[in-house]
Image (cartoon, helix red, strand yellow):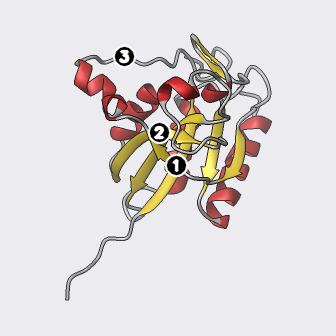
């Protein structure tokens, strides 16, 4: 009898999905990261359609992880520390609802943990303003076109489109 590894999914939107994908790929226990679109009204959206800011989709990453090696809470930490959750519908140079800060949860436990982490961070006084991250049930995830998958890796660059994490100077701001 073979042991089957248990995996879970986590979906995060934190602006440009290329930089978000690169950050999550570094996390031990993360088995795969796919970039795509979630939360909109158009079936099978394309990058070009999502960029019109009319489909309602966010650029997201779908993280497949081994919960025996990395917890959902640890993934939430990566999510919050690698983008600015205080900016509405924008990250760095990117503007529009497709760049919104959003957590799409896959279970009641994920919802509970996401809301608790958001609330804790919002109350701790470390951020320049209120956290605007939405916490919503997971919807249909549409993988982005192949040329977007592992984009930075394919380009041979070590870059991030995320310019800060919304924290005040002296409180972990970058």
- In the picture, the disc for residue 159 is 3
* Residue occupying image coordinates x 57% and y 45%: 43
Q: Are marks 2 and 1 in contact (CB under 8 Å)?
A: yes
For the C terminus, which image quadrant?
Answer: top right
Which residue is under mark 2? 36
Percent x, y of residue 64 = 40, 54
* Residue occupying image coordinates x 57% and y 31%: 14
Residue 15 visible, this orientation: no
For the N terminus, which image quadrant?
Answer: bottom left
Which residue is under mark 1? 141
Q: Is residue 134 above or below residue 139?
A: above
- In the structure shown, which secondary structural element does the residue marked by tag 1 occupy? loop
Q: Earlier in the sequence, mark 2 or mark 3?
A: 2
Q: Is residue 147 above or below residue 75?
A: above
- In the picture, the disc for residue 162 is none
Considering every residue shown, the one lying at the far bottom of the view is 1
Query: Which picture quadrant has residue 52?
Result: top right
How far apart, in angstroms, are the residues tagged by discs 2 and 1? 7 Å
Between 37 and 174, the one lying in front of the other is 37
């Amino acid at each position: 009898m073979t042991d089957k590894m248990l995996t879970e999914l986590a979906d995060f939107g934190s602006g440009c999905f290329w930089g978000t994908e690169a950050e999550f790929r570094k996390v031990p226990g993360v088995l795969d990261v796919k970039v795509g679109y979630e939360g909109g009204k158009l079936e099978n959206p394309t990058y070009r359609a999502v960029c019109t800011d009319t489909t309602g989709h966010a650029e997201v990453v779908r993280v497949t992880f081994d919960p025996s090696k990395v917890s959902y809470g640890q993934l939430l930490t990566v999510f919050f520390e690698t983008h600015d959750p205080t900016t509405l519908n924008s990250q760095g140079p990117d503007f529009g609802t497709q760049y919104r800060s959003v957590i799409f949860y896959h279970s009641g436990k994920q919802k509970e943990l996401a809301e608790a982490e958001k609330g804790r961070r919002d109350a701790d006084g470390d951020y320049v303003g209120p956290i605007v991250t939405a916490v919503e049930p997971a919807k249909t995830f549409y993988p982005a076109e192949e040329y977007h998958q592992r984009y930075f890796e394919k380009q041979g660059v070590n870059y991030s489109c995320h310019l800060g994490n919304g924290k005040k100077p002296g409180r972990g701001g970058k």
